[in-house]
C-alpha cells in the first residue's frame, strides 16, 4: 500500500470540506458521494487489518454523510467533515500504521479499482451539479440584462460578462464530463470558478462584476437630473470605479471573501447612495428604467432594500454583510 496514501486521503477529505464552503456549485449530495468513496475504501482496508471498530466507524460516517447532505445544511456538513470525519480517519491511519499489512497489500489493487470507479461517478455528479448551477446563474443574469435593455439602458458590459461566464467557466466544465476519466473533471472543478472558489485556478469574480455592471447601467442613464442629483450620481459612479480598481488588484487564484471586502464595500456604498437619490430621480421625466408611471422600476435594482446580489443560494446578501465580505450558512462560489 502506498505510504503516501494516508496524507492523500486526508488532504482530499479536507479539500472536499473547503469546497463545500467556498463554491456553491456542486451539490452536497455530490460532495457526499465523493467522500463516501473514501470512507468505503477505508472501511475495507481497516477490516482486512482486523481493526473492526475503526471499520465500523467509517461505515457509520458514510451514513452520516448521506444524512447531512439530505438536510442541505452546508455548515453542519462542513463541521462534520473537518472535525469528526477528518479526526477519525486520522486516528484510523495511526492504527493502520501499526497493523499487519500483508493482506491489505494483496487486495489493495482491487480495493483501489473499486474506489477509482466510485470516485469517477461521484466526480461526474459533482461537475454536472456545478455546471447546472453556473448555467442557471447565467440564465438568471441574462434575464436581468434583457430587462435593463428593455428599459432603454446600456447592458453591454453585463452581457459581455455573462458571455465570459459561459465561455470561460460553463463550457470548460461541460467539456470535462466527456473528456474521459476522473483527472479532467478534477482539473475542471479546481480550475474554473464563477466567483472565487478556485484557489489555484481561474476565478471570474462574477457576482461582484455583475453588480457593478448592473448598477453602472442604471446610474449612467440619468439624463435630466438636476445639478445636485448629478453630483450624487457621480459619487455612485465613483464608488463603482473604486470597486473595479479593487477588483483589478485581485489575482485569479483568490478564493477568500475577505479578499473581496474592499470591492464589496464600494458596491454597497454605491447602492446605498443610488437608493437615496432614486426617489428624486423618479420625478424626472427622462429618468432611466421608467415604467408606465415614469418612475424607475425597483425591479432594476437588487430585490431587497439595502442588498446586493452575491453568490449564496438566495442570490442576495445584506449590504452591510457584503461590505465585510462574509457569507451566510448557504455558502458562496
Image (tube, rainbow, N blue to C red):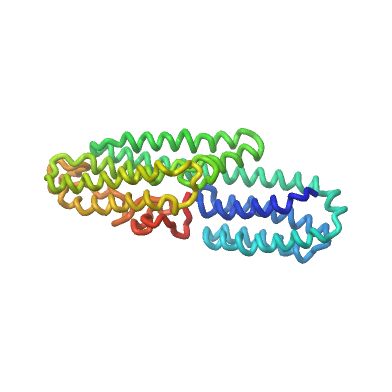
In percent of the image, x 44 and y 38: which residue is there?
Answer: 165
Q: Residue furthest right?
A: 102
Q: Quadrant of residue 151?
A: top left
In percent of the image, x 40 and y 46: which residue is there?
Answer: 207
In percent of the image, x 54 and y 38: which residue is there?
Answer: 173
188 lies above or below 310: above
Q: Residue furthest front?
A: 249
In x, y percent, where is residue 258? 44, 54
In x, y percent, where is residue 247? 39, 44
**Relative to 286, 275 lies left or right:** right
Q: How many marks?
A: 0
44 lies above or below 149: below
In x, y percent, where is residue 287? 17, 42
In percent of the image, x 47 and y 60: which residue is there?
Answer: 329
**Relative to 152, 64 lies left or right:** right
9 lies above or below 223: below
The foreground one among 300 and 200 is 200
Q: Quadrant of residue 174?
A: top right
**Relative to 98, 239 lies left or right:** left
In x, y percent, where is residue 238? 26, 45
Amino acid at each position: 500500500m502506498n505510504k503516501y496514501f494516508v496524507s492523500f486521503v486526508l488532504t482530499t477529505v479536507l479539500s472536499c470540506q473547503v469546497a463545500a464552503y467556498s463554491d456553491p456549485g456542486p451539490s452536497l449530495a455530490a460532495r457526499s458521494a465523493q467522500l463516501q468513496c473514501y470512507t468505503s475504501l477505508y472501511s475495507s482496508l481497516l477490516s482486512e487489518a482486523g481493526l473492526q471498530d475503526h471499520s465500523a466507524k467509517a461505515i457509520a460516517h458514510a451514513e452520516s454523510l448521506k444524512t447531512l447532505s439530505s438536510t442541505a445544511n452546508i455548515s453542519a456538513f462542513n463541521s462534520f467533515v473537518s472535525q469528526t470525519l477528518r479526526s477519525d480517519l486520522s486516528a484510523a491511519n495511526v492504527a493502520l500504521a501499526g497493523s499487519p499489512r500483508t493482506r491489505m497489500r494483496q487486495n489493495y489493487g482491487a480495493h483501489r479499482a473499486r474506489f477509482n470507479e466510485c470516485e469517477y461517478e461521484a466526480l461526474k455528479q459533482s461537475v454536472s451539479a456545478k455546471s447546472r448551477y453556473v448555467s442557471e446563474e447565467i440564465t438568471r443574469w441574462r434575464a436581468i440584462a434583457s430587462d435593463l435593455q428593455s428599459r432603454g439602458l446600456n447592458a453591454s458590459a453585463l452581457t459581455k460578462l455573462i458571455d465570459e461566464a459561459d465561455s470561460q467557466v460553463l463550457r470548460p466544465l461541460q467539456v470535462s464530463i466527456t473528456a474521459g476519466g476522473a483527472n479532467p473533471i478534477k482539473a475542471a472543478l479546481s480550475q474554473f470558478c464563477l466567483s472565487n472558489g478556485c484557489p489555484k485556478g481561474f476565478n471570474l469574480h462574477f457576482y461582484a462584476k455583475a453588480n457593478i455592471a448592473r448598477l453602472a447601467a442604471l446610474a449612467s442613464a440619468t439624463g435630466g437630473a438636476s445639478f445636485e442629483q448629478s453630483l450624487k450620481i457621480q459619487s455612485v459612479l465613483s464608488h463603482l470605479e473604486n470597486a473595479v480598481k479593487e477588483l483589478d488588484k485581485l489575482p485569479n487564484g483568490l478564493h477568500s471573501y475577505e479578499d473581496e471586502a474592499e470591492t464589496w464595500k464600494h458596491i454597497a456604498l454605491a447602492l446605498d447612495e443610488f437608493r437615496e437619490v432614486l426617489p428624486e430621480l423618479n420625478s424626472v421625466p427622462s429618468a432611466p428604467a421608467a415604467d408606465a408611471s415614469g418612475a424607475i422600476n425597483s425591479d432594476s435594482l437588487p430585490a431587497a432594500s439595502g442588498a446586493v446580489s452575491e453568490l449564496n443560494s438566495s442570490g442576495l446578501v445584506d449590504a452591510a454583510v457584503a461590505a465585510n465580505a462574509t457569507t451566510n450558512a448557504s455558502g458562496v462560489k
